[in-house]
Amino acid sequence: MHQMTLAEIARGLADKKFSSEELTKVLLARITQLDPQLNSFISLTEELALEQAKAADARRANGESGALLGAPIAHKDLFCTQSIRTSCGSKMLDNFKAPYDATVVAKLAAAGAVTLGKTNMDEFAMGSANESSWYGAVKNPWNLEHVPGGSSGGSAAAVAARLLPAATATDTGGSIRQPAAFTNLTGLKPTYGRVSRWGMIAYASSLDQGGPLARTAEDCAILLQGMAGFDQNDSTSIDEPVPDYSASLNTSLQGLRIGVPKEYFSAGLDPRIAELIQNSIQELQKLGAVIKEISLPNMQHAIPAYYVIAPAEASSNLSRFDGVRFGHRCENPENLIDLYKRSRGEGFGPEVQRRIMVGAYALSAGYYDAYYLKAQKIRRLVKNDFMAAFNEVDIILGPTTPNPAWKLGAKNSDPVAAYLEDVYTITANLAGLPGLSMPAGFVDGLPVGVQLLAPYFQEGRLLNVAHQYQLHTDWHTRTPTGF
């Protein structure tokens, strides 16, 4: 059962080959047995899962149907779930039980999805390796000595290890696509505003976006269908009709114009990954796609711009965690200032503190124009580059990451080296564009991903291309040894 995709589970439930309760029990037992070596879960919600599974079975018995009805998933631990710990991977929120469900959680629950638990993540989604979590690092099931990517590494590791078929995740600078590449999954960051951020604990509000992590593009289409849609509770949610993502999966790629930016193939890209990307391009050409070289001249400025904007927004968002209303509070504070200082100093880890300090500095009166304002101008230039490119091509293709997953601890002493691993993913967040990573091969036994970017609200196009590619390749079917 654990090897089934979300689509296969939907068909099996519809044909009454097994019940949601039976499947849920199998997967909960598998998580209990195997997750100690991965550390991919922060909380397991057995009682809730079995309750939801029984309810889903009853709904099916009454004639209801739906791809997510009775399907087991997990949520990244920054989606608020009522009466269940929502920690954001931080000591600061270790004791926080959300009083309500995030819109994504509520929508998926209404569709009948079964929540198995909450997955581990970099603290407040700040990181590229899932090593900054207060609950310990997550291991990559393809090699337990390597990182699974971040910040959605818990969701990625759990799905890659076949502990469950799919999971929710979030992407601020590549945190869905990069873990997908490192663990041989398909991961989709939707257009900014396509999926509600209400109830999703914020890191950088103008960059954060929820999305699906699964083994196939078909499964991502199913999960995104349940997640997407306008939400009046979220002022950044866009009132745009949600298409049937599964309906367009089998569209022909004949004549599809694919742009390949020359800037992607610089000295920083592992040549073995470059070769796998070229192989992917050739595969898509066989399917009728037309390849064209393009340029994204301002890509080189994206990382410095991102690491001004994101920490600036983080310093503002995280100011609410002060030990007063909720979250960690220090013992016996001498006064209000002592309460603030010690609660935040004890509750936040080093990476979060680092980004808060950088952000506060960038927003300070003497440096706002020199740093933050300039970064926002670069953001506009990055967006303009994409708009010009999409006048010539339908999608943009390139590597998801410049290197395969690195060893645990390898970049801990050099945060900038880890930041540079996001060079290909950050631009989509700055511009608000949809992006997808899909499996493209292996380097030294570690998975490699190819990234696709599309114009706004063209998630269906990305899923279509990835699905057609996966019909003609088998990278996405590979399973890590031991799982």
Image (cartoon, grey):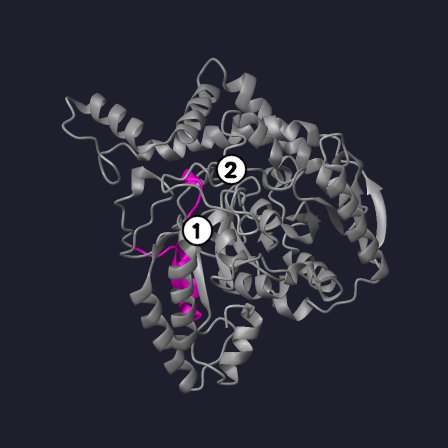
- Residue lying at the far top of the rendered structure: 366
Q: Residue at x 57, y 71 (%)?
A: 7
Q: Answer whether residue 242 is visible to the viewer in this image.
A: no
Q: Answer whether residue 353 is visible to the viewer in this image.
A: yes
Q: Which residue is mark 2?
A: 408
Q: Residues within 10 Å of mark 1 (few under 14, many from 20)?
A: few
First to last magenta residue range: 100-124
Q: Percent from the top left, x then y, of residue 478? A: 64, 60
Q: Which residue is mark 1?
A: 37
Q: Tell me if residue 105 is in the magenta stretch.
A: yes
Q: Residue at x 53, y 38 (%)?
A: 128
Q: Percent from the top left, x then y, of residue 67? A: 52, 73
Front residue of 304/270: it is 270
Rounded to the nearest whole Å, what is the CA distance between mark 1 and mark 2? 14 Å
Q: Residue at x 72, y 36 (%)?
A: 270
Vertical relation: 418 (above or below) 437: above
Q: Percent from the top left, x then y, of residue 266? A: 76, 32
Q: Residues within 10 Å of mark 2 (few under 14, many from 20)?
A: some
